[in-house]
Amino acid sequence: MKELIFATSNNNKIIEVQGKFDYEKCNIKILPVSQPFNPDENGKTFLENSYIKAFTAAKKMNKVAFGDDTGLCVKALNGRPGIYSARYALDGESKIEKLLNEMKEFKTLEEREAYFTCAITLVKPDGETLFQYQSKFEGYIDFEPKGEHGFGYDPIFKIKGSDKNLAELSLTEKNEISHRALALTEFIRWLNNNF
Ligand code: ITT
């Protein structure tokens, strides 16, 4: 079976990505990069940061690797936390608390528009990019956290056109519509044709 190194230290991402590959019957085994893995994510964009993760892992493992850089962009906050979504606060709970606090003055859902974006890059150990894609998944910042599934900002992300927050969806349901699912659909299509 073919193998791909996943340049991440986030177990939740590994579960979602392997789940999507299995669901799409993509016959590729996802192997997490050996830990510890903390590349300096100093890119200016999601795509740059996904490349930095992928290239660092590809060099480390001497194999083709892909990285996922994800963030939550809030319109009323001029796109913040954006590429700083991981460093916005120390842990998941305080990130949500800090964001809800910043959003206090925005009283209607329309003022709380936001989107998740997920950039994926596949890189060879010599640094050549084989595939790149960035998705966008629209919604709103809810007034309070809801749901027990998912991770990160999922409990406060209200899905556009739905009465549910992302954390109210099962893994399979999230993997049908989310920012990561949209990017992975393109990635798997590319892999099926080219890898
Ligand atoms: P790696 O860089 O090791 O892959 P990370 O968790 O640091 O793991 P990101 O930089 O891509 O990954 O994530 C930025 C932040 O966004 C981080 O706080 C995550 O918890 C959060 N996040 C990422 N994917 C998410 C998702 O699907 N739903 C909600 N929050 C997410």
Image (tube, rainbow, N blue to C red):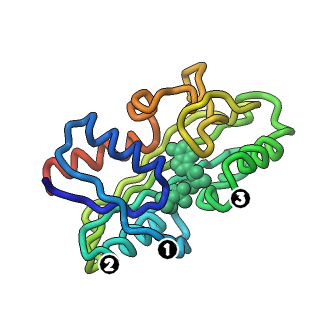
Mark 3 surroundings within 10 Å by alpha-carbon count, few (fewer than 14), some (14 through 19), many (20 or more): few
Residue 148 located left or right of residue 190? right
Question: Closest to the observer: 115 or 95?
Answer: 95
Q: Name the residue tied to disc 3.
A: 90
Cα–Cα gap, marks 1 and 3: 18 Å
Q: Name the residue tied to disc 1.
A: 39
Residue under the image location 38 percent in, 56 percent down? 120
- Residue 60's label in the rendered image is none
Residue 164 located left or right of residue 146? left
Residue under the image location 62 percent in, 28 percent down? 147
Q: Name the residue tied to disc 2.
A: 59
Q: Which amino acid lies under the numbered mark 1 shown in the image of this protein? A: Pro
Question: Is any part of residue 116 visible from this angle?
Answer: no
The part of the image, by quadrant, that contains residue 42 is bottom right
User: Which x, y percent locates residue 19?
Assistant: 34, 39
User: Which x, y percent locates residue 105?
Assistant: 86, 39
Which of the marked residues, 3 or 2, is nearer the chain's N terminus?
2
> SS of the residue at dot 1?
loop
